[in-house]
Image (spheres, helix red, strand yellow):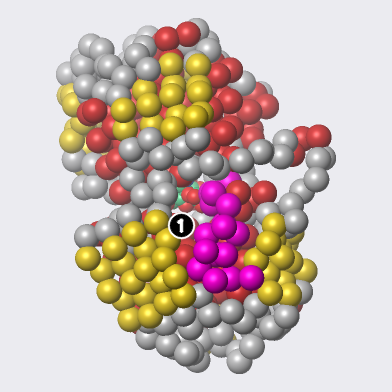
Amino acid sequence: MQYVKLDGGEKMSSLRIRGGRRLDGEWTVGCAKNAVLPIMAASILSDDPTTLLDCPNLSDVKYMGDILRTLGSEVEERGHEMRIDPQGISSFEMPDDLAKRIRSSIFMLGPLLSRFRKATVTFPGGCEIGMRPIDLHLAGLRQLGVQVREEGGMVYCDGSGMRCGSVHFDYPSVGATENAMMAAVTLRGKTYLHNVAREPEIMDLQYFINAMGGKVSGAGTNTICVEGVTSLRGAVYRPMPDRIVAGTLLAAAAITGGYIRLNNAPCKDMLAIFSKLQEMDCVIGEKNTVVTLHAPKRLRAFPQLQTQPHPGFPTDMQVQMLTLATLAKGTSIVVENVFENRFTHAGDLNRMGANVVVNGRMAIVQGVDALYGTKVQARDLRGGAALAIAGLQAHGETIVDQAHFIDRGYDHLEDMLSALGADIHRE
Ligand code: EPZ
C-alpha cells in the first residue's frame, strides 16, 4: 500500500459508496493494530531481530516503523511480514515530528527506559476524540522510580533510579499499562501493576514479551506481575486478530440486513459486541475463531449502550453501533464513558437523514426509515469507518472524504466491503 504523505498536501482519497446492496460473504480477519503497535515498541527490548507475521498495511503501523528507523532500528516490510532489527538503536530521543503524528509513539517510553534508563519524548497531541493526556503513563513510571520532567512540550525521563515495586493506576489505561509492563521487564525483582487495563491486546503484549524470554503474568486480570530478566531475545510472532475490524464488518453486514462469516475472529474477546448485536435481533453463531451473523430485515434498537474498559463494551465499536441505531426500529441511548468527544460523525449522519441528538457524553438516537447518500467527511478512524457503514444502506451515493483517517486502522476497508458484495470504490 502506497502511503500518501499528508504533510505535502498530496491528494487525499475518498470512498465512494452506492448504497442498498445486501452484504453476503466471508472474510478472514487480519492482525490487530492495537496489538501490533505496542509489540513493535516492545521489539526494542532486545538487540536480536524480531519478525512479526501477517502485519496489516496500516498508516499507523508504517509511522511506527518510521519511528523505530529514526531511533536506529532496521525495519523491513516484505508484504505482510515485518522484520525489526533493533541492534542499531542508539538514541533514546523520540523524533518530534513523527511522535506528534501518531499517539502510539508514547508506547516507546517504556521500552526506551528499559533499554537506556533514559527517554525523551514529545507530548503526543490530542486528537479528534479527545485530549489524550499521558498523566497516567507518567504516574506509573514515577512509581517505578523514574524522574520525569515536563518542559516545553517535551517529557524528559531519567530512569537511573528505577527499581521494581508496586504501581497502582487511578484508571485502567491501556497505554499506561503497556508502558509500565515494558518499563519493568528488565528491573531486577518482581513488579506488581494494580488496577491495570484488561484489554486482550495487553494479553498479546504479555505473550510477545514472554516469547522474547520475559516473565510477565496476569495480563487480562486487574493485576500484572513483571519478574525482571537480565536480557531478552528476538521472537517470531503473529499478533492477535483485530476484534474491532471484526466487529466493524459484523456491523456492515448487519446494517444491510445481510449475512457474514468471519474466519480468524477473536470470538472470546468479542462477547460484548455479540451481545449488543443480538439485542438488535441479529442471529450470531460462534465457534472457536469463526463467527457468523444473520441480520434481520430491520434491526431493533438497543435500549442502551455504555462504553467501558474491557470486558465492557469497547469504545472503538461505539460509533459503528450508533450508526446501526440510526436505522433501527425504536430509540437507542449511547453513553461514551471512555473518550470525551467520540460523537464526531453524528453531524454527518444527521445530514444523511438520521436523528441523533448529542448531549455531552450521551447521544439519543431515534431510528428513521431511511438514510440518504451525500458527501461526508471522516474526522477520526472509527467515525470514518462508521460513515462508510452508513453509506452501505443509504439511498444513492455516499462519498466519505479524508479516507486516510480510515487507513490508520483498516487495511483497505473498501476491499473488505467489496469482497462482501458492497458497491464501494476508492478515488
Ligand atoms: C488505546 O488507546 C487504543 N489505542 C485506543 O484505540 C482505544 O480506544 C483505547 O485504548 C481504549 O480501549 C491503541 O491501543 C494504540 P487509554 P489509549 O489510555 O491507550 C484517558 C483506535 O480507534 N487517559 O485506555 O490511549 C484517555 O484520555 C484507538 O484504535 C488519561 O486521562 O487509551 C481516555 O479518556 C482509539 N490519562 C481514557 O483514559 C492517561 O495518561 C482511556 O485511554 C491516559 C489515558
Q: Which residue sits at x=31%, y=28%?
A: 236
* x, y percent for residue 245: 46, 57
Residue 205 as seen in the image, left or right of residue 34: left
Q: Is residue 101 visible?
A: yes
Residue type at mark 1: give it. Answer: Val
* x, y percent for residue 69: 55, 19
Q: Is mark 1 within 8 Å of ligand 1?
A: no
* x, y percent for residue 35: 39, 41
- Mark 1, other Cα within 10 Å: few <14 / some 14–19 / many ≥20: many
In the picture, the quarter occupied by the N terminus is: top right
Q: Is residue 363 visible?
A: no
Q: With respect to residue 276, does 316 lie above or below? A: above
Nearest to the observer: residue 246 or residue 20: 20
420 falls in the magenta region:
yes
Q: Which residue sits at x=77%, y=69%?
A: 375
Q: Which residues are magenta?
A: 408-423
Secondary structure beneath label 1:
helix
* x, y percent for residue 2: 66, 38
Nearest to the observer: residue 321 or residue 418: 418
Residue on which the image places disc 1: 245
Nearest to the observer: residue 390 or residue 134: 390
Dividing the picture into quarters, in which one does residue 192 lie? top left
259 falls in the magenta region:
no
Q: Which residue sits at x=64%, y=88%?
A: 370
Q: With respect to residue 385, does 356 lie above or below? A: below
Residue 406 as seen in the image, left or right of residue 328: right
Dividing the picture into quarters, in which one does residue 164 lie? top left
Q: With respect to residue 89, does 412 lie above or below? A: below
Residue 243 as seen in the image, left or right of residue 216: right
Q: Which residue sits at x=62%, y=82%?
A: 20
